[in-house]
Image (spheres, rainbow, N blue to C red):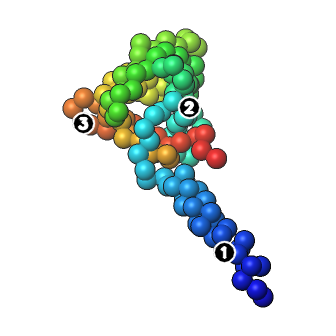
């Protein structure tokens, strides 16, 4: 086979290597996430409370029984949520207490550690309030 026939194949190798590197970086779940906008988080393996961070500083979600909405501000790892408002349906069983704790943890957020698949929310004193997993990751 002549060199001229192999030239297009040889020229495509660097492009394929670059594409593979870009795909690997996009799926590197340990890299810090710089913005929460457009992400949704909940508890691992539990269908219940979740929080969605939207564009323009809007936040919404469910406490497991009631829906909530409000605002957030993120500056690096610093996170301020609230005020939050929610619907006021009564729930039976432990759902109300779970919801109360979840919403309280969100409103007491001081800073976060976020990767593409995990979000940890911390209080001002450094204690961990929530450990959530990404729900909208494809």
Q: CA distance from mark 1 to mark 3?
A: 53 Å
Q: Residue at x 49, y 12 (%)?
A: 85
- Could you say whether the residue bearing mark 2 is in a helix, strand or loop? loop
**Which badge, 1 or 3, comes first in the chain's sequence?**
1
- Which percent across, then down, holds residue 77? 34, 34
Left or right, residue 129 beside residue 92? left
90 or 86: nearer the viewer: 86
Picture residue at 35% right of the left edge, 33% below the top: 76
Residue 100 appears in the rendering: no
Q: Is residue 94 left or right of residue 129?
A: right
Horizontal arrangement in the rendering, residue 61 relative to residue 127 (left or right):
right
Q: Nearer the viewer, mark 1 or mark 3?
A: 1
Identify the residue at image location x=46%, y=16%. 71
Residue at x 41% of width, y 13% of height? 83
Q: How many marks?
A: 3
Q: Is residue 113 above or below residue 88?
A: below
Q: Which of the labelled discs sits on residue 10, or is there none?
A: 1
Instruction: Name the residue nearer the viewer: 19 or 81.
Output: 19
Badge 1 marks a residue whose secondary structure is helix
In which quadrant will I find the N terminus?
bottom right
Q: Which mark is residue 126?
A: 3
Q: Which mark is residue 73?
A: none
Q: Mark 2 or 3 closer to N-term? A: 2
Task: State the CA–CA distance, disc 2 to disc 3.
Answer: 26 Å
Name which quarter of the figure residue 126 lies in: top left
The tag earlier along the polypeptide, 1 or 2, is 1
Q: Are marks 1 and 2 in contact (CB under 8 Å)?
A: no
Q: Residues within 10 Å of mark 1 (few under 14, many from 20)?
A: few
Relative image position of residue 6 (x, y in whole percent): 73, 79
Position above or below: 31 against 33: below
For label 3, the SS is: loop
Q: Disc 2 marks which residue?
A: 38
């Amino acid at each position: 086979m002549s060199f001229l026939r192999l030239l297009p194949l040889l020229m495509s190798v660097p492009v394929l290597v670059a594409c593979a590197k870009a795909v690997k970086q996009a799926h590197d779940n340990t890299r810090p996430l710089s913005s929460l906008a457009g992400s949704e988080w909940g508890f691992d393996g539990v269908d219940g409370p979740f929080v969605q961070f939207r564009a323009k500083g809007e936040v919404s979600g469910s406490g497991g029984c009631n829906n909530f909405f409000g605002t957030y501000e993120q500056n690096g790892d610093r996170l301020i949520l609230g005020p939050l408002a929610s619907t006021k349906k009564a729930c039976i069983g432990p759902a109300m207490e779970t919801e109360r704790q979840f919403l309280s943890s969100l409103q007491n957020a001081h800073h976060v550690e976020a990767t593409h698949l995990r979000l940890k929310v911390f209080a001002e004193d450094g204690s961990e309030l929530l450990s959530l997993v990404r729900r909208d990751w494809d």
